């Protein structure tokens, strides 16, 4: 987490929305004294009440072993990000930097029971398939029972209730408005900077 407090984001609603917008997280843990990490799509609980984050890994994943052994977990969600050239500021004596948005959730996890694991698989597919409309939503019912049961046997699902849930929005808040405007215009002209420019505009509005 970036140490500069001006970049920190603590509003739970904002953080939850960023998890929804960028749900593919890196989840890290410690196994036998060594760091391990893996990617997973994460589904946050609905608004209201304590936040929980659900995800799953294969039985063979080293992170699964670590979490089952009691390791705390750190989930990192990365939003829009891009290189920022000092030439874009229009002021002297500047250096390159990287603007980005990210969210961190840390705490202990609980293994979900079989019924909750199956529900998570359905919830994940429903959530992501809904974004593919008008295509009909894929359902596990389309699979043969034997194939589906084999899939379930290879998965372990978890729930993380964060003890720490905070984010970073490093968007040149430490620069004059004119310099930020120059960065926004330059990012808009790059292939991967448009989303980041939009986030900077929202902060300035």
Image: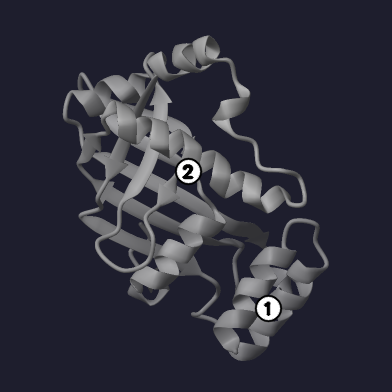
Q: Tag 1's secondary structure?
A: loop
Residue 189 x/y as whole percent: 83, 67
Numbered tag placed on residue 6 in the rendering? none
Task: Please tell me in which quadrant of the rendered image residue 8 appears.
Answer: bottom left
Q: Residue at x 65, y 58 (%)?
A: 83
User: Does residue 104 lie above or below 87 as drawn?
Assistant: above
- The quadrant the N terminus occupies is bottom left
> How many tags in the picture?
2
Q: Which numbered disc, 1 or 2, marks the residue that appears first in the sequence?
A: 1
Along the viewing direction, whichever of 55 and 99 lies nearer the viewer: 55
Residue 132 x/y as whole percent: 72, 48
Residue 199 x/y as whole percent: 61, 73
* Furthest residue in direction left, as rendered: 70
Task: Please tell me in which quadrant of the rendered image residue 65 appears.
Answer: top left
Task: Please tell me in which quadrant of the rendered image residue 11 appears.
Answer: bottom left
User: Does residue 149 lie above or below 201 as drawn?
Assistant: above
Numbered tag placed on residue 89 in the rendering? 1
**In 3D space, how far apart are the residues under numbered discs 1 and 2 (Cα atoms)?**
45 Å
Q: Residue at x 48, y 65 (%)?
A: 17
Along the viewing direction, whichever of 151 and 108 lies nearer the viewer: 151
User: Does residue 185 lie above or below 128 as drawn?
Assistant: below
Residue 116 x/y as whole percent: 32, 35
- The quadrant the C terminus occupies is bottom right
Task: Say if residue 171 shows up in the picture.
Answer: yes
Q: Are marks 1 and 2 in contact (CB under 8 Å)?
A: no
Residue highlighted by disc 2: 123
Color style of the picture: one colour
- Observer-side mark, 1 or 2, equals 2
Q: Residue at x 48, y 34 (%)?
A: 39
Q: Tag 2's secondary structure?
A: helix
Task: Say if residue 91 shows up in the picture.
Answer: no
């Amino acid at each position: 987490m970036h140490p500069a407090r001006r970049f920190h984001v603590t509003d739970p609603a904002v953080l939850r929305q960023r998890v929804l917008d960028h749900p593919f997280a890196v989840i890290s843990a410690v196994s036998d004294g060594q760091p391990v990490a893996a990617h997973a799509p994460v589904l946050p609980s609905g608004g209201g009440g304590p936040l929980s984050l659900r995800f799953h890994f294969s039985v063979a994943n080293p992170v699964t072993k670590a979490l089952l052994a009691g390791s705390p977990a750190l989930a990192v969600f990365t939003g829009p990000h891009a290189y920022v050239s000092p030439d874009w500021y229009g002021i002297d004596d500047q250096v390159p930097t990287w603007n980005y948005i990210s969210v961190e959730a840390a705490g202990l996890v609980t293994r979900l029971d079989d019924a909750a694991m199956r529900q998570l698989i359905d919830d994940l597919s429903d959530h992501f398939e809904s974004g593919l409309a008008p295509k009909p939503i894929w359902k596990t019912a389309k699979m043969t029972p034997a194939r589906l049961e084999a899939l379930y046997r290879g998965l372990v699902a978890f729930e993380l209730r964060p003890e720490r849930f905070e984010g970073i929005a490093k968007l040149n808040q430490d620069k004059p408005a004119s310099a930020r405007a120059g960065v926004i215009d330059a990012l808009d002209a790059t292939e991967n900077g448009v989303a980041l420019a939009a986030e900077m505009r929202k902060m300035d509005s």
